[in-house]
Amino acid sequence: MEIIERALEFEQRKHTFKTTSERIESSREVKDLILGLNTIYKEEKDPEIMDLMKRLTVIKQKIEKRLKGRP
């Protein structure tokens, strides 16, 4: 369950991104983690994995909101 450990580590990381490239990189990383967790969830149907995916999705939405900026 390496991907679960990576996802938990990403969740605990400090999310202060100084540059746009750091934001893009972290957005792609969290997207890959969510998709990987989704494939595991499809097989196991573990509610803890779903909760982890939901928490990561909130982080991803915050990063992407910051990337898009204000209109």
Image (cartoon, rainbow, N blue to C red):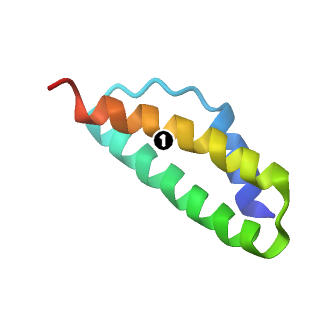
- Residue visible at 55% across and 36% down? 58
Farthest residue to the left: give it: 71
Tell me residue 36's x, y (percent).
Answer: 62, 66
Q: In which quarter of the image is the N terminus?
A: bottom right
Left-right relation of 66 to 54: left
Which of these two is toward me, 2 or 62?
62
Left-right relation of 58 to 44: left
The residue wearing badge 1 is 60
- Residue visible at 40% across and 28% down? 17
Locate residue 38: give its quadrant: bottom right
Tell me residue 71's x, y (percent).
Answer: 14, 26
Q: For the residue labelled by badge 1, is the local secondary structure a helix, a strand or a loop? A: helix
Left-right relation of 25 to 46: left
- Residue visible at 79% across and 76% down? 43
Q: Is residue 47 depicted above or below 35 in this figure?
A: above
Which of these two is toward me, 37 or 11?
37
Count of numbered circles in the view? 1
Within-10-Å neighbours for mark 1: few <14, some 14–19, many 20+: many
Locate residue 12: give its quadrant: top right
